[in-house]
Image (tube, grey):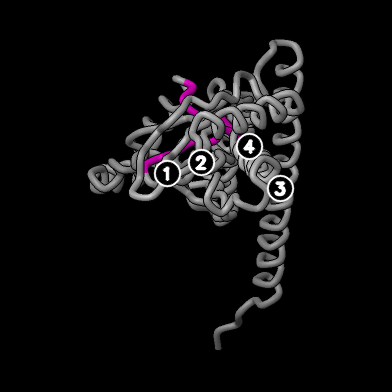
Amino acid sequence: MFDFNWEALLLKTGIIALQLIGTFIAFLIVKKIGNKIIERTFTRLQEKQNISLGRSHTLQKLMENILSYVLTFMLVASIFGIFNIPVASLIAGAGVVGLAIGFGAQGLVSDVVTGFFLLLEKQIDVNDYVTLGALDGIVESVGLRTTQIRGFDGTLHYIPNRDIKSVSNHSRGNMRALVDIKIAYDEDIDQAIIVMQEACDQVAANNPSIVDGPNVIGVQDIGTSDVVLRVIAKTVNGEQWEVERQLRKAIKEAFDAAKGNSSDTLGQDS
């Protein structure tokens, strides 16, 4: 009768389980320490080399991404070693398999190449407001394979780098606040422009985010029942929407003060 050595099996299983647990714990510890070192390194570089905050965060996320890939590969290799699977032959086999699926991996290669040039040419950085194709939002991460964009509704979009055909970066330089105000045909356009400009000057005096203007540039369009007057201003990046809201409010209040409660025909925001 076959005598199976259960004690040896349990002992071997226990040793393998302990090795696996130890490997995973070491993986987590090294990853945490590595991310901490990367964070401190880029914090010092930002202070000493005068690197922008967005650029520093971008490179930091990239290094954390690379560290994660390297540690994951080492973790898998260690697990194979625990089960006595020769890593060298596995890599050789992977080369043969990789040759067979090479055409299917073109997308991955394209992701990496595109991501490399996005970073090399500094097209986008973390915290930039960008438009990538049909999506716009704030950049949260730029990796070698994917770029993460947080939409204004809170949705986090993961975009494969190969799908990024064009980049519109709204965070480089000053931005423009633009407000169109509709007034009725029977209103005095010159008087409306004076009232609007006085309101714009008051907003500019109290808002340091405004770099230039606001200026009422005149008649922008003529509709079927109204005339559109346009106001433009240059603002600090990211503050254009707040300035637009302030301008609308100030112009509405200025019209109310000048015309009483007749602002239903004078000064309708388009």
Q: Residues within 10 Å of mark 1 (few under 14, many from 20)?
A: some
Q: Secondary structure at mark 1?
A: loop
Give the CA separation, mark 4 to mark 3: 52 Å
The Cα–Cα distance between marks 4 and 2, rounded to whole angstroms, is 10 Å
The answer to the question of whether label 4 and label 3 lie on touching residues, with beta carbons closer than 8 A, is no
Q: Which residue is mark 2?
A: 181
Magenta-drawn stretch contains 182: no
Residue hosting label 3: 28
State the residue position of label 1: 185
The first of marks 1 and 3 along the sequence is 3
- Main SS category, magenta section: loop
- From the image, state whether disc 2 or disc 1 is nearer to you: 1
Q: Which label lies toward us, 4 or 2?
A: 2
For residue 247, the mark is 4
Among numbered discs 2 and 3, the one appearing first in the sequence: 3
Q: Amino acid at mark 4?
A: Leu
